[in-house]
């Protein structure tokens, strides 16, 4: 009987490699293990956030400190960080201007429910960087997307959001759907899901304008919610003309186009939208927008803002379903202004772009030399190796390409060689603080790990 192959490697070989690497990881972390044994039990499942268990290591790495693109664990390992808080720290850990702004605000109050002069400055900077929108602040990109959807439903009077199969926009309930046999269904793993999500959402394949048009023709879609590039499974790039087609279809069918730039902010200054001239009705970005301080922003075009104001004037006063108490606090504005004016700069983006191009070229060379049936994709500062041939065109292509057992083995192999990459896919980010030596070490580690898996 022939052996099961995953990404070109025998499953038994992957398992043996992963087991060896798990032992190496554990042997090098006696302090971490002892600390976990002493202090993890008050947490549900041993961690303060359930997905912290989903890393491939046999037990979590406890972080002692992080600065720039280096993270240090409790056992004193200094690790090159390409995960960068999976985008929250895409501009490096504690960028100096943000750290200064936080220190200055720390003595002047942390939350007031009132705006500040710095908030007014932040609004202008948001327009300068992302375009002349009418902005609101939230604490997470999840919330920003939820609020954007409310506005879209309010102005259109329609119930549904159109999302792409395989998408992720945070824990927005309505977007937690997928396609099965051509039908929109709730994702099978959702905890405590009782509402029938097909009443409020429709999923279609990415890059399929005909399917988008068919869904919009039903007349019940309030908004299309999409990332410019699908980044949350294996990366799927938009086909030429896809975004122009989406814009055109949204306008023709009266749906609001929401572009979620939370990950594609890696593309360059102003995100993929500015770099590639997209024209969303609502623009959303979170995670790194305030340098790592929990902040998201969402902006409406002036036209949509006018439509929303007309709607707003007609609704009864009271809860809107948008906003949380700690959102729009002065710490967020201090960090937002520091990030937008001193961190998210053309110079920093140029460094990130050059570093990512170096990483992409280095990994691609290894893939080619070893004749791996894999490919490498890049969106600005975001690079991903995918353990299957490319390019991918849809979420279902991405799901097929995803190779969890192989990826977990690779991740722990890379970590044991000093490089941390994002846990749920093979994503690597280059910050302005990431230097060439770190990038070259990651390429060398990738070479060493693939040698172990592929060489006989
Ligand atoms: C594209 C996109 N939008 C929104 C979110 C949600 O961000 P948060 O978890 O900060 O709410 C994510 C998280 O990964 C994301 O990838």
Image: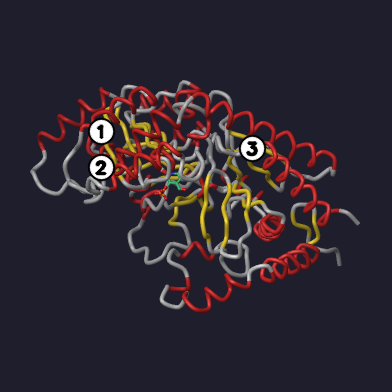
Q: Is mark 2 on a helix, strand or loop?
A: helix
Q: Answer few, some or many: residues within 10 Å of disc 2's Cα (few below 14, many 20 plus, some between 14 and 19).
A: many
Q: Is mark 3 on a helix, strand or loop?
A: loop
Q: Mark 2 points at which residue?
A: 330
User: Are dots 1 and 2 in contact, CB under 8 Å?
Assistant: yes
Is 416 situated above or below 199?
A: below
Residue 299 in picture, x, y percent from top left? 31, 32
Q: Write down the quadrant of residue 99 in the picture.
A: top left
Name which of mark 1 and mark 3 comes first in the sequence. 1
Task: Residue at 46%, 35% (x, y): give it.
Answer: 212
Mark-to-mark CA distance, 2 and 3:
33 Å
Residue 110 in picture, x, y percent from top left? 25, 49
Is 230 situated above or below 270?
A: below
Q: Is mark 1 on a helix, strand or loop?
A: helix
Q: Answer few, some or many: residues within 10 Å of disc 3's Cα (few below 14, many 20 plus, some between 14 and 19).
A: some
Q: Mark 3 points at which residue?
A: 435
Name which of mark 2 and mark 3 comes first in the sequence. 2
Q: Name the residue under label 1.
A: 118
For this rendering, which residue is in front, 34 or 346?
34
């Amino acid at each position: 009987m022939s052996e099961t192959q995953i990404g070109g490697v025998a499953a038994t070989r992957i398992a043996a490699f992963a087991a060896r690497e798990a032992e190496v990881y554990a042997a090098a972390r006696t302090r971490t293990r002892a600390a976990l044994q002493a202090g993890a039990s008050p947490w549900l499942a041993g961690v303060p956030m359930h997905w912290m268990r989903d890393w491939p290591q046999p037990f979590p790495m406890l972080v002692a400190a992080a600065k720039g693109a280096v993270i240090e664990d409790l056992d004193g390992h200094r690790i090159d960080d390409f995960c960068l808080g999976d985008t929250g720290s895409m501009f490096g850990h504690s960028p100096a201007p943000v750290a200064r702004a936080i220190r200055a605000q720390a003595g002047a109050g942390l939350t007031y429910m009132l705006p500040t002069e710095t908030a007014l400055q932040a609004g202008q900077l948001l327009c300068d960087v992302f375009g002349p929108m009418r902005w609101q602040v939230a604490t997470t990109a999840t919330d920003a997307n939820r609020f954007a959807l409310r506005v879209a439903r309010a102005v259109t009077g329609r119930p549904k959001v159109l999302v792409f199969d395989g998408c992720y926009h945070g824990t927005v309930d309505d977007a937690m759907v997928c396609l099965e046999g051509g039908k929109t269904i709730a994702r099978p793993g959702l905890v405590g899901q009782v509402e029938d999500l097909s009443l409020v959402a429709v999923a279609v394949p990415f890059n399929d304008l005909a399917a988008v048009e068919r869904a919009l023709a039903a007349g019940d879609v309030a908004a299309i919610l999409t990332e410019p590039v699908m980044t949350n499974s294996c990366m799927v790039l938009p086909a030429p003309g896809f975004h122009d087609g989406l814009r055109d279809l949204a306008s023709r069918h009266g749906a609001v186009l929401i572009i979620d730039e939370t990950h594609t902010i890696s593309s360059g200054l102003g995100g993929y939208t500015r770099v590639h001239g997209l024209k969303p009705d609502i623009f959303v970005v979170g995670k790194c927008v305030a340098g790592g301080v929990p902040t998201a922003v969402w902006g409406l075009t002036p036209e949509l803002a006018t439509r929303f104001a007309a709607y707003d004037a007609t609704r009864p006063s009271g809860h809107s379903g948008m906003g949380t108490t700690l959102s729009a606090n002065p710490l967020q504005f201090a960090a937002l202004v520091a990030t937008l004016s001193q961190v998210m700069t053309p110079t920093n983006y140029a460094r990130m772009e050059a570093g990512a191009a170096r990483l992409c070229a280095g990994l691609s060379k290894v893939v080619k030399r070893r004749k791996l049936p894999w490919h490498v994709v890049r969106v600005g500062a975001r690079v991903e190796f995918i353990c299957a041939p490319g390019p991918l065109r849809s979420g279902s292509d991405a799901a097929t390409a995803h190779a969890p057992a192989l990826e977990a083995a690779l991740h722990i192999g890379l970590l044991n060689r000093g490089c941390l990459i994002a846990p749920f896919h093979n994503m690597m980010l280059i910050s302005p603080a990431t230097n060439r030596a770190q990038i070259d070490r990651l390429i060398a580690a990738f070479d060493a790990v693939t040698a172990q898996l592929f060489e006989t």
